Image (cartoon, helix red, strand yellow):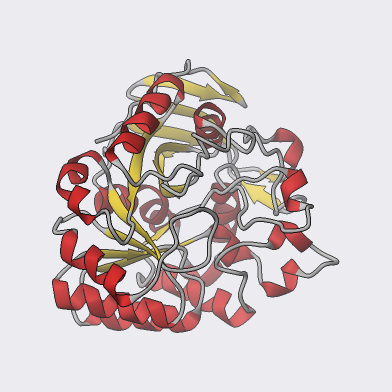
Amino acid sequence: MKLPGLADPHVHLREPGSEDKEDFYTGTCAALAGGYTALLDMPNNPQPTSSLEALEYKKQLAAAKIVCDVGFNFGATPINAPLYPQVEPQVAALKVYLGETHGPLVFGGLEGMLSVFQGWNSPRPIMIHAEGPIVAATIGLAALYDRRIHICHLSKRDELVLVRAAKERGLKVTCEVAPHHLFLTSEDAAPDHLGPYGHMSPALQSGADLDALWQGLADGAVDMIATDHAPHTRAEKEGPKPPFGVPGLETAFPLLYRAVKQGRAGVTLDRLVDLMALVPRRVFGLPLGDSEIEIDDSEFVISSENLLTKCGWTPFEGQLGRGRVRRVWLRGQLVFEDGRVLAPPGSGRVLF
């Protein structure tokens, strides 16, 4: 069966600064293995993508290594709003970190939030990393300043209630859900199960939250699925302060396709294609119709041994997937076949 190439607006390819976890080549190889042909990279590197120089340097690094298409999200700080007019044509979105996460870009306070919403006068979205009451605050600011916002990795039933209410009132709000919040709960993060490998931000939630997210996928309250691919080395995860994040590019589609075939929450295959391929492209202005994937229809056991991500592990070890990606075409060229990346480094395009 052939489907459109998938698109993920929320990945951490880790370069520059954390190439021991992932780099532009290994991350985009993992993307092709998972059926993704377009990615948007996040800005919270050790040297954050929050200046024109950092953005240009990242684009140069990517151009030499990527095997699928990659665009970038720019990191907001309390003081870099004067750069927004120059940055806006070069990026997919502005990313604002208003909650605990990995990297140096987290900030809070009303003055900093106002600088973002007053300064980003663009049809491109403001991507929000926030939880709980801060989600409500950003929706309020979006209404006041008539801005498009996109809530990243929404994980809680109450947050989805806010998004539904905002949409009912015609506000420019979209949201995404990550696979780990659809297939894992807080019980999975217990020390005798995933332990540090279940340590992520937002944290894994309750079964009731998980069920609410699935309902949102089915009825349209959730706009898209984004992996929040955030690889770390095993040594870091097993260390005294395990960082947030899990890899996800290679496991997202088979987990979701199997759930769809089982009839989970009434989500159809057409709806899954919207969530993973078409809506992310429309919301973030990514190319449409330039790629295709071929999948088989058999089940298989997910294993870390077969992954192309540099970190080499998955929290879904031993779970069943369905719909292994056999082939991927990008702009008419066969770039992946049966576990082998055929595209040379640098053959992907830097978007925007």
Position of 209 relative to 235 (above/below): below
Q: For the C terminus, give its image quadrant.
A: top left
Residue for point 45% across, 80% down: 132
Residue 71 vs residue 115, the one in the foreground: 115
The image shows residue 343 at horizontal and vertical percentages of 47, 18
User: For residue 34, what is the image quadrant?
Assistant: top right
Position of 39 relative to 243 (above/below): above
The image shows residue 197 at horizontal and vertical percentages of 72, 56
Question: Position of 64 compared to 150: left or right?
Answer: right
Residue 221 vs residue 30, the one in the foreground: 30
Position of 122 relative to 3 (above/below): below
Position of 89 relative to 149 (above/below): above
Question: Position of 291 compared to 202: left or right?
Answer: left
Number of disc labels: 0
Residue 243 vs residue 339, the one in the foreground: 243
Residue for point 38% across, 76% down: 135
On the question of residue 262 being in view, the answer is no
Residue 200 vs residue 265, the one in the foreground: 200
Farthest front residue?
Answer: 79
User: For residue 308, what is the image quadrant?
Assistant: top right
User: For residue 140, what is the image quadrant?
Assistant: bottom left
Residue for point 58% across, 43% down: 323
Question: Position of 129 compared to 248: left or right?
Answer: left
On the question of residue 319 being in view, the answer is yes
Farthest right residue?
Answer: 192
Question: Position of 118 compared to 243: left or right?
Answer: left
The image shows residue 183 at horizontal and vertical percentages of 62, 64
Residue for point 34% across, 21% down: 332
The image shows residue 63 at horizontal and vertical percentages of 38, 23
